[in-house]
Image (tube, grey):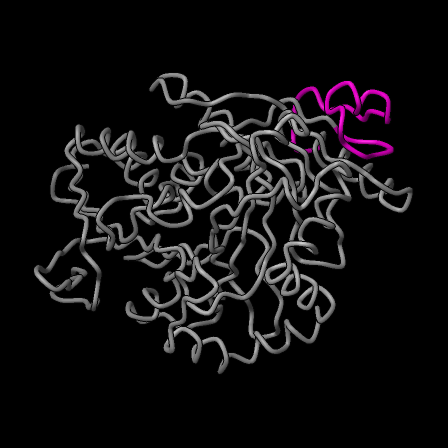
Amino acid sequence: MGTQRTFLIIGGGLVGLATAYRLLERFPLARITLLEKEAAVGAHQSTHNSGVLHAGLYYAPGSAKAKLAVVGIRQMTEFCRTEGIPHEICGKLVVAVTAEELPRLDELLRRGIANGLQGLRKIEAAEIRKIEPYVNGIAAVHVPEEGIVDYRQVCDRLAARIQERGGRIVTGARVAGLERKAGAWVAATKTEEFDADFLINCTGLHCDLVAKMAGEPRDVRIVPFRGEYYHLKPEARHLVKNLVYPVPNPQFPFLGVHFTRMIQGGVEAGPNAVLAFAREGYQLTKFDLRDMLDMLLFPGLWRFLRQYPAMTCSELIQSFSKTQFCRALQRLVPDIRIADLAPGGAGVRAQAMMPTGKLVDDFHLVVRQDALHVLNAPSPAATASLAIGEHIVRQLPI
């Protein structure tokens, strides 16, 4: 492959960066331009998350999530080790609080083993206390391969490596239009036009809109869900040593609140999951009329809300009530008190949804002869980004 082959990547989050990085590994002579609308790469989902390295425990064996998470955590850990990026493989407990949760815990263990995780084991209450003295549980799965990382540094280091290899990263470049001209894609921004043979859409919260610009039908719609966090105050941080997660409830589409020790220090508690009023609605008061109309006119959203009325109400109450949020946390760590919680940040999850109201659970790529659109890249996309980048490169019809 020579220098004549050109790629245009829209979106400078971890998936876009990793894709550019892997493209340059495979095609070192290619001309690659990555456009990012913000002033810096990794400004949204890539750095508005809990900073966890996910090993692939939860995901259905054989799914893209499972395959890419297991490979991805090892690739990400190796990248961080090579680049000197702060990270730690500290392990995680997934805790069953009631007997009703034990069969689901056993299923998680089965999935993890089937997915190829190493060192998984089921432990009882006494051993839970040895690992996490303040955690309430009757049994747990210990996941020794999971860890924490500084994804901000991962983004910055990937960007540096891309540029060292000849890739071009343009920030402050919001794409306002896409069209095909003379056999090439042309992306128009306020100040400049960029062209390339092949288009790769990695725009996360805006991926369905960018795909529409490129002429794709909106078979799935991005619906943004805000996840809000609290931090444990310094005097309460001893209550959680590393990572403590609940057993997921299959009746609800989201995981539930959990505890995460952060690589920069401190412990984060959350998130809940509430409908955001803007695609980048990190604050409760952030409202975007265009985004709201797009959601409210989408039948899938109303079908989703009808399927999960109890969860919708519960998550909304937790958003407004610190007391309710604390009660949810106390299920795992009973000694947590309202006074122990300080306001934290928030992230917005770009959740792809079908017109039926069903959430798209796995990674979802649309591949054309001259374009590839990443239309769903939920967790563990940050952990698995290098593996996703490899997967995208393998999908290219070139």
Q: Quadrant of residue 310?
A: bottom right
Answer left or right for 332 relative to 390.
Answer: right
Which residue shows up at 88% across the image and 43% down it?
98
Foreground of the two, 149 or 217: 149
Answer left or right for 30 relative to 117.
Answer: left
The residue range painted magenta reads 114-141
**Residue 282, x across and y down, in percent:** 43, 57
User: Is residue 79 inside the magenta stretch?
Assistant: no
How many numbered circles are shown?
0
**Residue 292, x across and y down, in percent:** 44, 76
Foreground of the two, 295 or 180: 295
Which residue shows up at 43% across the image and 38% down it?
385
Q: Residue furthest left?
A: 191
Q: Is residue 177 above or below residue 239?
A: below
Which residue shows up at 55% across the image and 40% down it?
231
**Residue 302, x across and y down, in percent:** 60, 78
**Residue 384, x across and y down, in percent:** 48, 37
Foreground of the two, 300 or 110: 300
Q: Is residue 105 above or below residue 365?
A: above
Which residue shows up at 39% across the image and 60% down it?
280
User: Is residue 120 inside the magenta stretch?
Assistant: yes
Q: Is residue 336 above or below residue 224?
A: above
Answer left or right for 361 relative to 296.
Answer: right
Q: Is residue 369 above or below residue 167?
A: below
Q: Residue furthest bottom?
A: 297
The quarter of the picture where the N terminus appears is: top left
